Amino acid sequence: MAKVEIYTTPICPFCHRAKQLLQRKGIGFVEHNVMLDPSRRAEMKARSNGGRTVPQIFVDDRHVGGCDDLYALDARGGLDPLLAAS
């Protein structure tokens, strides 16, 4: 199974939606709360080529994007193969 990482804040509704999709699919993920650990925000920006909003989602170090990007990838059938690739 792929390694999924998601940079979030607890007050972000898009973060909750992205996590819900992953949970519905039974995918475990590592969550980095950028509100509790501000150093993670700089890490997130560097990994996502300047992405400043949350969530920022990575699958096996590949930047997927944010919540809308995750749902779009799923809608076109690309998420499940990506998650199963590892």
Image: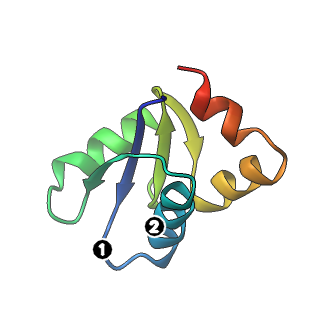
Q: Earlier in the sequence, mark 2 or mark 1?
A: 1
User: Could you tell me residue 34's position as x and y percent?
Assistant: 25, 58
Identified at 64% across, 52% down, the residue is 70
12 to 76, vertically: above or below:
below
Residue at the image position 68 percent from the left and 39 percent from the top:
80
| Image position of 42 with respect to 16: above or below | above
**Which residue occupies 36% across, 52% down?**
7
Secondary element under disc 1, as helix, strand or loop, is loop
User: Which amino acid does the dot numbered 1 rest on?
Assistant: Pro
Residue at the outermost front position: 26
Q: Circles 2 and 1: CB distance less than 8 Å?
A: yes
Residue 67 in picture, x, y percent from top left: 59, 60
Q: Is residue 51 visible?
A: no
Q: Position of residue 1 (x, y in %)?
A: 48, 28
Q: Which residue lies under the disc numbered 2?
A: 15
Work out whether residue 38 can be spotted.
yes
Q: Is residue 42 left or right of residue 20?
A: left
Q: Nearer the viewer, residue 32 or 42?
A: 32
Asked whether, in this view, residue 23 is left or right of residue 39, the answer is: right
Q: Amino acid at mark 2?
A: Cys
CA gap, disc 2 to disc 1? 8 Å
Residue of label 1: 10
Nearer to us in this view, 52 or 28? 28
Task: Bin the neighbour count of mark 2 within 10 Å (Cα to Cα): few under 14, some 14-19, many 20 and up.
Answer: many
Q: Toward the viewer: 29 or 5? A: 29
